[in-house]
Image (cartoon, helix red, strand yellow):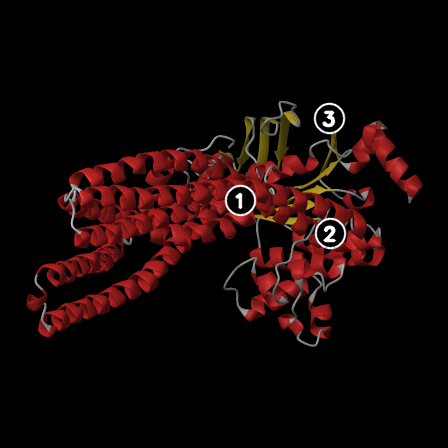
Amino acid sequence: MNQHMKTGTLIRRFSPYFKKYIWVVLLDLFCAALTTLCELVLPLMVRYITNQGMNDMASLTVGIILRIGGLYVILRIIDTCANYYMANIGHVMGARIETDMRKDLFAHLQKLSFAYFDSTKVGQIMARITSDLFEITEFAHHCPEEFFIAALKITVSFIILARVNFWLTLIIFAIIPLMIFSSMFFRTRMRHAFKKSRNQTGELNAQVEDSLLGVRVVKSFANEEIEERKFEEGNELFLDIKKEQYRYMAGFQSTTRLYDGVMYITVVVAGALFMIDGKITPADLIAYLLYVTTLLTSIRRIVEFTEQFQRGMTGIERFLEVMDAPADIIDLPDAQELRDVRGEIEFRNVGFHYAGDEHAVLANINLHVAPGGNVALVGPSGSGKTTLCNLIPRFYDVTSGSILIDGNDIRSFTLHSLRGRIGVVQQDVYLFAGSIRENIAYGRPGAAEEEIIEAAKLAGAHDFISEFEDGYDTYVGERGVRLSGGQKQRISIARVFLKNPPILILDEATSALDNESERLVQQSLEKLAAGRTTFTIAHRLTTIRGASLILVLTEDGIAEQGTHEELMARKGFYYRMYSMYNENE
């Protein structure tokens, strides 16, 4: 989203998060009113004492002075308690709103399809879910409070000052619109600069994440200097954006200070002239200056808060950009639970292309797989093998045609129940940071210890797990870095064994393994596939000779299909691939 949302739109869409804490907000504003009252009373006390001292010193007794002092002490105690509430409970409310927003953002991210993550950097998402929302804590607490205090002070100050000297008050308040106009000029540019800064923060996060996750590749090619250079370029760009941000911020604050001076000198000069004409007393002029100080302090706080306000607006805008990303793969209103799966799968005239790319990855795919069938997919890279398999659990939705399970369109089932009946073993195994037990149990949260161990045995993983000092409590490290490729793959297979799905997708699950690991993993996969409808994307063609159906995919669709013997007898595309593979072996 390149265009900025309007401030009113952002506040309107953010306001529902306040509703949950409306009583906290109202009490916070009440406390803000108390602190403002305490601040506004002091100039009145000074004015009273000065007037009495100048006009009738005898009436200014010790008792009156002590009572005024005592009243001010009481007001200060009230001010202290009110300020404590604002600083403590008010900030906690802001943190709770931030927590609610982060919860909603993460929940929405879970609903987004692969297509969103294909085009969005993880570092950008991380920036939006962490640092962007940090700014909202301060904004959520201070926004209503600061504007309420400023409105109250300006209104009360105007009433009191107008009663002291109406014309001097008009002169002072005539300067304020000029001050606001100048501030708006810089505020707009600050908003743009803050958003650019946030975007570049996300880019830096993405770059650091990419470099650190690929640190083994970096070091193996001795390319540390290249990574440092790439980071330096991004870091310098971030500095340039910061310079622009601080330039506008400096202009904003300097202009405000200039108007501060203009207002003070206007009060002093105009006030002195009015005093010469007898239109204002010295005591009133002193009180007037104190109120102008209060007024300017209030305006200055709003000016300083404008920076926080713009940061908050930027955070809310970037939050809404993610929340507005459509969850394009969702349950239909009448979606049913998928139960008692036999495993019959049918593709009817299926076509697919990625969003923003009209080039068809798959076109007019027709396929029928009987329950318990073992389908192997072979073909050159980019022919759509993985894409075809990704359509079954609706990681992507078909562009045309339909996919049926047991005679029903997969879109008629809830996503949770559909994906719950499909197991996927991928080439690129992802293990979460945690123990081996936790990673296996991810296949069925809440599974008993005996079930986890049984799944590990079926996957051929129990023996090597038992050799670890901590057994199933062994920490696997970030992305399973402390385990070998074969060990990680067998743990991922154990995870699917525990899930026990009737439909299985094996996406080149052994292609990255050495021969010994491949042999062990292949044995585990054969046990896993038994009695299930299985789609296997094959890397080594010798592993799929026993498949009940082999599909040869090319850019033009299904070029050939049949059993190994049938395809070899045709001496077509598959025959040439298999012969070439055997020669290379």
Residue 526 visible in the displayed image: yes
Front residue of 132/351: it is 132
Which residue is the extreme one toward the right? 583
Q: Amino acid at mark 1?
A: Tyr
Give x and y (percent) for residue 430: 65, 54
Q: Single out the mark in the foreground, 1 or 2.
A: 1
Q: Residue at 62%, 41% (x, y): give it.
A: 240
Residue beneath label 3, please?
Answer: 555
Question: Rounded to the nearest whole Å, what is the CA distance between mark 1 and mark 3?
Answer: 53 Å
Residue 409 visible in the displayed image: no
What number is the disc on residue 214?
2
- Left or right relative to 300: residue 167: left
* Mark 3: secondary structure: loop
* Mark 1: secondary structure: helix
Q: Residues within 10 Å of mark 1 (few under 14, many from 20)?
A: some
Give x and y (percent) for residue 423: 60, 49
User: Dividing the picture into quarters, in which one does residue 450 lie?
Assistant: bottom right
Residue beneath label 1, please?
Answer: 246
Q: Residues within 10 Å of mark 3 (few under 14, many from 20)?
A: some
Question: Rounded to the nearest whole Å, what is the CA distance between mark 1 and mark 2?
Answer: 34 Å
